[in-house]
């Protein structure tokens, strides 16, 4: 048990701090994050190794060895300084590692540099309306036409599709193969004729996602990553990298802090919420959970440092983390009373309406990307070794 | 011994429900929400035709002269269809204020217009129902009001407001009084309207009752029950939608409704919601027949339905998977309706605090 | 909506009260409930129609028409007066109605009278260690030997087996028939050679149940109720009557009353529990549930009076009722702090240790007689019309 | 940066666990429970051999000189095997009292005997940890105690008691003091011993510290953590038992562990309990390394493990079906162990109230 990072890493932390002190004023500010400003900041971060840190120099990265603690320190310091982190889009977090693992040299040269510099924006074409949790049942088909595929079908939950230059997309190239086979992983331009993007409004009122429709979209066969028919395996390699996305390592902790502040400052009939034992008790229950998940995260981090498989402790994080974030938002809404239902641009709005927005969006996270139900199946089967459900007879 | 709805009550509720299915399908709700109509004219007209705005207003004033239980049944039907019309304040609380504390002249002026759907009344009593926030509070002196009232219900289309001052006195304020500023508050629920009212020495007509406290109490009790019944209707519809969706949506080669996990979620929702119906019925009955427990029952109905409603809203959304999270099926209108009802006139914690007081526990 | 019972029933209530006022002193008191005392009281109750009320006179009952409100009034008044109700054992509540419905005239004459008078005590032989929720999979077999069956196997959860004179028992007489067929419903004496009764201690520390072992127990074939091989149907008819058992119609309400009293009288550091907002809030949550279930009961009662099928509202009662009772006990334990864990004959014990006993026993009820899981299956399938799980392929 | 057990710690815990599996299988627990042995001699001897009673006692006094985190790991192993031996009071709280507030003579008299397993110490501080009930409270004057202390822990086999008086002063009282009446309190957990202590001008030796308050605080913090860790071990074992049972028990033609409902119950238990481990670790670490948050973390560990433990105890029993309700598999020993741990030194509500105070919230 040693929670110090040690002198080597503290020196690194000092470096990051020094960088931030010197350059933070060049960071794009909230609200005025222009494309150009974002790219300039990203370029600066790559030069100093605070973005694309472990991408080889040959492909435009910084070329450092992977080091989990360094990554964490970067995240901690950027959050503490309120500075925007390096770009974290799906192209950078999912496609780039996949190309490094399974792409051809040509694909790497062509795509990694522009992607990490933010010059090419990607979206991900995995989910379909009929597939949901059962991703392998996807139906978008790619029929052969000479050296090309003709793609027809529909994708959903495609965030940033309306902004994206390119898509990495799963399509069924071998319709007669078993469902986990016969899928291929294609890269193509979102400007290809036959692609229509429709915004997908969610319960938050915003269009955080899109639907993407393909009608005879022509894509050269050469734009496959990995082998033809092996797209399922390639995609799973990609999914593995999803957690590589950096962010606030203790989002729940930040939210709790805001809740405590809320309870200290909001009053009802002149009484502070924190002086009401019922609110206090509920806040304390949440605080225990936040601490438990924070320390659980330290435990997992240590495991990763030691190269251990995360196992059961890793499998529960999404289920418990999303639920906890949802419950933290629920506390704020409840404690705010009528103020808690305000939204949009309402007067008296608290926290820009983010408590409600998070409450709903977190419910989306509980549901999406493997529902809580699927998570529990996985925990019981892979984490506890319980038997799979028998296949139905008919 | 008959603890059930009368045939008339069942028919009345059925009529409202069928009317709303006709004039207020999801697409109409969507349209109303997009354009912030919280008194959707066609829906309002259809409901007026069958007497909904005047349900508890005496027949002598042009109403139907029914009980609060009947109003709760109507609220349930409105919640079921997330109907974008005023009700809890305009058709329940304000009429009770006028009937309980208004002079004959005040009653004659407003009750017939409310019953006929020609006028809408907003009600500003949040400071008494849930406690004052952000410095809200209204002072009355010499027939004038000053200060601000937050979260006035059914405020958007209101022609008149019933306002409680800090001391619990009740006042009628015309919506177009020159020194009254009405500021709409946008909430998650686009089918309902709340506002901040700012009074600057605004002329107000006191309601005549010598002791307005019991009237204010009954207004809040009745409003809470109406909101609770709204949750019941919304929750019931969400369960039906979840069960229907689960019967159609296929994953892993079977309809998801055949997965035990999904079935159990639906069973838990139904098991939680079903006893709430009897609680609403009893609270409605108690309002007129069990004076000693009327406030307590209204409080329990409001608090318990809020808790169960939150569980149902979340769980039904979960059963719908990603579709429940999108706008495509419109399920979120029900989700937000429940969320709104939960917080108005006191969230569950606050209402339980009142319930303790009603029993001399605090 | 009319919660009055009306003059006819109020007159009946007065009768019951008058009876209780006149005879309550003849009732056996808690602790000294001797067999003889209990039987004398039962005899008196039958004479006045407060026990075996609807059993025909020909079989020793009182011979009244069934009337749900009269039954309820009897229960209400006996509870209010603290007088023991008529005997409510499994013979009276389950076997007698079954014999009335499916028994031969001879079986009725032989068994109903002695059973309702408490002269013959029955136990029920349904559950087996391997069957649990899946009752139809029972294995106790009855092989033919001339005019007799020879019974071998084991039953479990047999309450009162150690006191019983007789057993009504499900055995498999047709081993090759499908599992719901080939079962027969037998009556036989618990004194038959080859029967061993072993007390089954539960987590409460008491032996509320038994295991019963059969080794070559010889039973004449004539002692079948209903047709041979039709025992499953007979048993289901019996289970239907289980809810006929009378008891406190609002047990949760009585328990809540005790909790409120507890919260008003128990103190911690001089503060009454009811003055602590956190306990109060939890108590109020429970109170809402108790009221909801009480009124839900009135709704079901009205439905029964009108002859309506209980449907979904009926199906949820066990699940919600058992859980609520369990939660009421949990409140008492928690609110009592360390006092809440006391048990047995401990000094400072509250309520004779019944809070803990009920907490555990109610958990047993949640589990037993169709676990909560099975209840949820039933609610979803029969109450909501959801599909059954597909049969496994293998 | 290393948030994990050291190899030594893992080995130590493993050693205790293996020892208990050998000397304290279910049958031994059953026997001890039946005969009310709460210091089962053979189990105690085996644990003494590997240093458990003296785990945190300094080596100079014959102990192992380890930290509270190590004690928590030991408690976890004891809970896992529902071991019928004293621990939280005798091996954690009393040594801390002596180490923190005892004179060199007092330390020299008791610590070696406790470390060697020759003596057991009970601790009576319930009035400070959970509040006084039934008029409990001890007054100290002139080296004598009067009044009663309830729920003294590890009391049955105790040779000496550490007693907190009303003002928080700490005293050593010999178990055979003539005017001390020790009355056993029977609880659901037959593997643990609590008692009422009645003092009638009973001679007591004050612990020497000038300010005993911080020592009492650390005793309670450490005791809470030991009980929380006990729940962790018991809960973990219950999950394993549920998973194992579900893999063997067949119903409707399949093992019940293949039913989604059963799988999800097990997944929920694991998901709830797993993060608790890190919370216990941190609370143990904080006791020595994060003074500012030590009391808060101990409180959170106790309260949160109590809530999760109750959920796990109930759910694991449910997965076992009727068998879980009987004595046959002995699952109830774990169930009751968790129930006991939950209530001692403050139930979750009380402990959270303390947690609020530690942060200046109340």
Image (cartoon, coloured by chain):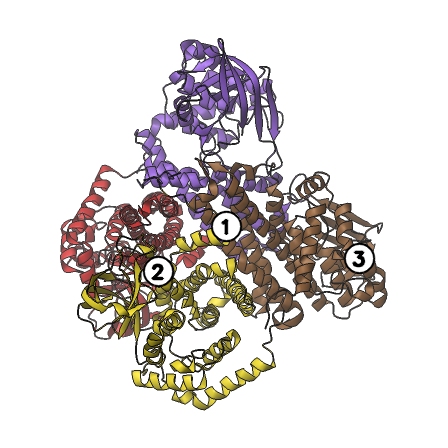
Chain colours: A purple, B brown, C yellow, D red
Q: Relative to A167, does residue B281 appear above or below in the rendering?
A: below
Residue D235 image position (x, y, % from top left): 31, 51
Mark 3 near mark 2, Cβ–Cβ under 8 Å?
no
**Residue C368, quarter of the rendered image:** bottom left
**D35, D4: nearer the viewer:** D35
Q: Residues within 10 Å of mark 1 (few under 14, many from 20)?
A: some
Quarter placement of the C terminus of chain C: top left
**Whole-Å distance between the Cαs marked 1 and 3?**
42 Å
Q: Chain of mark 1?
A: C
Which secondary structure lies at badge 3?
Answer: helix
Mark drawn on residue B114: 3
Q: Chain of mark 3?
A: B
Which secondary structure lies at badge 1?
Answer: loop
State which mark lies toward you, 2 or 1: 2
Residue A217 image position (x, y, % from top left): 55, 16
According to the picture, the residue beneath numbered tag 1 turns out to be: C385
Q: Chain of mark 2?
A: C
Q: Residue drawn at (49%, 41%), measured in percent from left and top?
A: A325
According to the picture, the residue beneath numbered tag 2 turns out to be: C232
Residue at mark 3 shares a chain with residue at mark 2: no
**A62, C343: nearer the viewer:** C343
Q: Relative to D273, does residue C39 appear above or below in the rendering?
A: below
């Amino acid at each position: 048990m040693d929670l110090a990072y040690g002198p080597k890493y503290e020196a690194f932390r000092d470096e990051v701090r020094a960088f931030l002190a010197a350059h933070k004023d060049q960071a794009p500010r909230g609200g005025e994050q222009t494309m150009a400003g974002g790219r300039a900041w990203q370029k600066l971060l790559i030069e100093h190794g605070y973005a694309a840190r472990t991408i080889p120099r040959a492909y435009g990265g910084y070329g450092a060895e992977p080091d989990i603690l360094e990554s964490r320190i970067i995240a901690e310091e950027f959050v503490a300084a309120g500075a925007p982190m390096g770009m974290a889009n799906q192209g950078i977090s999912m496609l780039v590692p996949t190309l490094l693992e399974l792409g051809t040299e040509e694909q790497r040269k062509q795509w990694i540099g522009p992607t990490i510099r933010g010059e090419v924006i990607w979206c991900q074409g995995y989910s379909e309306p009929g597939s949901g949790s059962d991703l392998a049942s996807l139906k978008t088909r790619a029929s052969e036409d000479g050296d090309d595929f003709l793609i027809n079908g529909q994708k959903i939950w495609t965030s940033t599709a309306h902004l994206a230059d390119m898509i990495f997309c799963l399509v069924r190239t071998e319709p007669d193969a078993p469902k986990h086979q016969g899928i291929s992983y294609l890269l193509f331009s979102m400007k290809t004729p036959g692609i229509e993007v429709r915004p997908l409004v969610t319960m938050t009122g915003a269009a955080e996602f899109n639907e993407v429709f393909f009608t005879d979209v022509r894509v050269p066969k050469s734009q496959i990553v990995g082998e033809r028919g092996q797209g399922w395996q390639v995609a799973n390699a990609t999914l593995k990298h999803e957690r590589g996305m950096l962010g606030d390592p203790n989002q729940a902790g930040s939210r709790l802090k805001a809740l405590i502040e809320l309870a200290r400052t909001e009053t009802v009939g002149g009484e502070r919420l924190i002086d009401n034992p019922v609110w206090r008790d509920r806040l304390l229950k949440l605080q225990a959970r936040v601490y438990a998940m924070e320390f659980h995260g330290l435990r997992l981090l240590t495991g990763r440092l030691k190269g251990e498989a995360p196992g059961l402790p890793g499998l529960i994080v999404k289920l418990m983390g999303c639920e906890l974030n949802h419950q933290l938002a629920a506390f704020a809404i409840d404690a705010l009373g009528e103020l808690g239902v305000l939204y949009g641009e309402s007067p008296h709005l608290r926290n820009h309406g983010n408590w409600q927005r998070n409450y709903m969006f977190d419910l989306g996270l509980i549901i999406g990307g493997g529902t809580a139900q699927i998570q529990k199946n996985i925990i019981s089967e892979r984490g506890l070794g319980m038997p799979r459900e028998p296949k139905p007879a008919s | 011994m008959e603890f059930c709805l009368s045939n008339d009550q069942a028919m009345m509720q059925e009529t409202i429900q069928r009317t709303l299915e006709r004039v207020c399908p999801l697409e109409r709700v969507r349209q109303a929400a997009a354009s912030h109509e919280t008194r959707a004219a066609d829906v309002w007209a259809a409901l007026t035709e069958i007497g909904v705005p005047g349900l508890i207003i005496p027949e002598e004033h042009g109403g139907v002269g029914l009980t609060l239980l009947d109003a709760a049944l109507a609220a349930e039907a409105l919640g079921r269809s997330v109907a974008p019309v005023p009700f809890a304040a305009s058709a329940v609380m304000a009429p009770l204020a006028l009937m309980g504390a208004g002079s004959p002249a005040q009653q004659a002026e407003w009750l017939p217009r409310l019953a006929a759907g020609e006028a809408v009344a907003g009600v500003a009593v949040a400071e008494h129902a849930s406690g004052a926030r952000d410095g809200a509070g209204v002072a009355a002196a010499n027939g004038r009001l000053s200060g601000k009232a937050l979260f006035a219900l059914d405020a958007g289309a209101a022609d008149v407001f019933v306002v409680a001052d800090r001391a619990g006195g009740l006042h009628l304020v015309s919506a177009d009084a020159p020194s009254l500023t009405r500021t709409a508050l946008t909430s998650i629920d686009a089918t309902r309207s709340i506002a901040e009212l700012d009074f600057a020495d605004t002329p107000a007509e006191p309601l005549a009752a010598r002791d307005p406290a019991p009237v204010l109490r009954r207004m809040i009790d009745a409003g809470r029950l109406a909101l609770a019944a709204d949750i019941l209707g919304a929750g019931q519809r969400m369960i039906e939608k979840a069960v229907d969706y689960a019967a159609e949506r296929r994953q892993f080669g079977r309809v998801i409704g055949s997965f035990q996990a999904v079935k159990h979620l639906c069973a838990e929702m139904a098991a939680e919601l079903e006893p709430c119906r009897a609680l609403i019925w009893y609270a409605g009955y108690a309002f007129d027949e069990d004076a000693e427990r009327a406030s307590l029952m209204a409080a329990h109905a409001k608090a318990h339905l809020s808790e169960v409603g939150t569980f149902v809203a979340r769980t039904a959304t979960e059963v719908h998977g990603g579709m429940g999270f999108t706008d495509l099926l419109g399920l979120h209108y029900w989700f937000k309706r429940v969320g709104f009802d939960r917080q108005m006139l006191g969230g569950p914690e606050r209402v339980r605090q009142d319930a303790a007081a009603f029993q001399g526990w605090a």
